[in-house]
Image (cartoon, grey):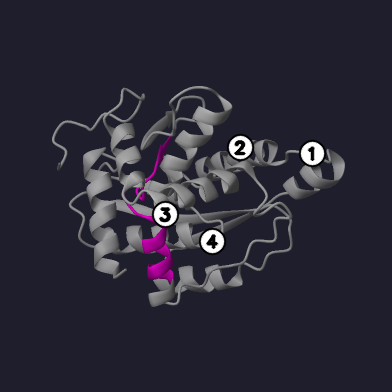
Amino acid sequence: MKIQKLYSYVRKAIDDYNMIDEGDKIAVGISGGKDSLALLYALHGLRKFYPKHFDLCAITIDLGLGMDFSPIQSLCEKLEIEYHIEKTDIAQIVFKERKEDSPCSLCAKMRKGSLNEAIKAMGCNKVAYAHHKDDVVETMLLSLMYEGRFHTFAPVTFLDRMQVTVIRPLIYVHEADIKGFVNKYDVPVVESKCPVDGYTKREYAHDLLTSLIKDNPGVKNRMFTAISDSNIKGWEKKEGAHY
């Protein structure tokens, strides 16, 4: 995928859901993976011509897994984006002290807590998560299977306790397009060292969606449309959106 196409998808999502306001300072949560780096590229390029001025920074929550984030540091220096690494002992707590059988929930909760505290300290009022279209549908499948309800995350979420707004500008982007973008532009992805990577419920939902797409071409887009047209809280397009 060419970078111009990435800009187009991201701008449409931002406009449809009024994700950015004049004067925002937006932190991009960087895991080191392909999705968050594609989002960083997109917002960096978009702010050059977007009508509403916004500032951009990047932050990584270091879980303590021994990952090397120096390629991300170099990329942010090249793009002239402020970059902060918040070191934590989350991996120590989750895997060694608590020895969680299902560690993802606790890890995610602790990671988000550390991220929110760090971005507030950096003076940011918004944080951009790199969830893409596949993530939206996979989360809906997980909710149906394990919670018995039709639900997924919203494009925009205001965290009242933290006074921070979460935005998800990649919601119209297919994961396959992100992979193509990363390969085309030689994006410096940092390999995850999480010991449960590939063995989670989300990975199961990912494999299930892949199988559904193989047997039913177009099913992902139809599921996404069902989500967009539903009454799920937060999915209402805003007044003045570009349809």
Badge 4 amino acid: Gly
Of residue 70 and residue 101, the one placed in the foreground of this image is 101
Q: Which residue in the protein does label 2 denote?
A: 113
The secondary structure type at the circle numbered 2 is helix
The secondary structure type at the circle numbered 1 is loop
Identity of the residue drawn at 51% across and 40% down: 120
Magenta residues (range)? 165-182
Q: Earlier in the sequence, mark 3 or mark 2?
A: 2
Separation of disc 1 and disc 4 at Cα?
24 Å
Q: Earlier in the sequence, mark 1 or mark 4?
A: 4
Q: Is residue 167 magenta?
A: yes
Separation of disc 3 and disc 2 at Cα?
37 Å
Separation of disc 4 and disc 2 at Cα?
20 Å
Foreground mark, 4 or 2?
Answer: 4
Separation of disc 4 and disc 3 at Cα?
25 Å
Separation of disc 2 and disc 1 at Cα?
18 Å
Of residue 168 and residue 124, the one placed in the foreground of this image is 168
Q: x and y percent of residue 63 in the render?
A: 69, 52
Badge 2 amino acid: Gly
Identity of the residue drawn at 33% across and 52% down: 217
Identity of the residue drawn at 44% across and 51% down: 130
Question: On residue 214, which mark appears?
Answer: 3
The secondary structure type at the circle numbered 3 is helix
Q: Which residue in the protein does label 1 denote?
A: 100
Q: x and y percent of residue 26 in the render?
A: 40, 48
Foreground mark, 3 or 2?
Answer: 3
Q: Earlier in the sequence, mark 4 or mark 2?
A: 4
Where the N terminus falls, by quadrant? bottom left
Q: Quadrant of residue 56?
A: bottom left
